[in-house]
Image (cartoon, grey):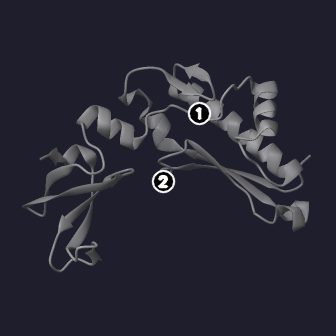
Amino acid sequence: MFPGKLKFSLSSRLTRSAGKTLCPKNIGRLRPETVVIEVRMGLDFFLRYHELPGDKTVSGIVTHHPLEALQIVFEHELCHVLEFIYFHRSNCRGSRFKTMAFRIFGHTESCHRLPTPGAIAREKYGLKPGDMVWFVFEGRALTGMIYAITKRATVMVEDSKGPYVDRRGRRYQKYYVPVEKLTKE
């Protein structure tokens, strides 16, 4: 009965949340038939589902397969869609959302415990932000510090010509390196 458009997409860029619902902030002032709500699913969470052992809980439900996890994340996002359509805002920490998710789908939590890139880096490779690492780039061994881990590790390498400057005036170059290519110092 929603006169607007619902879109569904898969994203390889989501690294912290397995799903995201996008809705115009001014939805309440738009004509309903012009509203576009998009549900975006974080593809890597499901492709890397088996990379770490242990339970993978989604919305309070233990999953056994990546497709099951995807379904439950999608159910969670559908609750966001309903809240946006009827109330023009959505908050999965709010009691209205929690009640709706429980009554419709039996969800008891509003979060997931699927392997994130940071958790995989920590568990599988023993790497975390702040660690000193080395890697090979264009035939040269470089040493730097892991600044962040998303899809790849962001490594800051000291470089007198680098565009990034810290509080002490040291200059750095930024490199995006696959975690499996890093060696801890």
Q: Which residue is mark 1?
A: 70
What residue would you read off at disc 2? 13
Give the x, y percent position of residue 86.
88, 48
The kind of secondary structure element at disc 1 is helix
Residue visible at 49% across and 32% down in the picture:
114
| Above or below, 36 relative to 166 | above
Marks counted in the figure total: 2
Q: Is residue 93 left or right of residue 156?
A: right
The residue type indicated by label 1 comes to Leu
Q: CA distance from mark 2 to mark 1?
A: 16 Å
State the mark number for residue 144: none
Residue type at numbered disc 2: Arg
Q: Looking at the image, tell me whether mark 2 or mark 1 is earlier in sequence order.
A: 2
Residue 91 placed where, x, y %?
73, 46
Residue 143 placement, left or right of 108: left
Q: Which x, y percent locates residue 106? A: 74, 22
- Could you tell me if residue 30 is visible in this image? no
Q: Is residue 107 above or below residue 143?
A: above
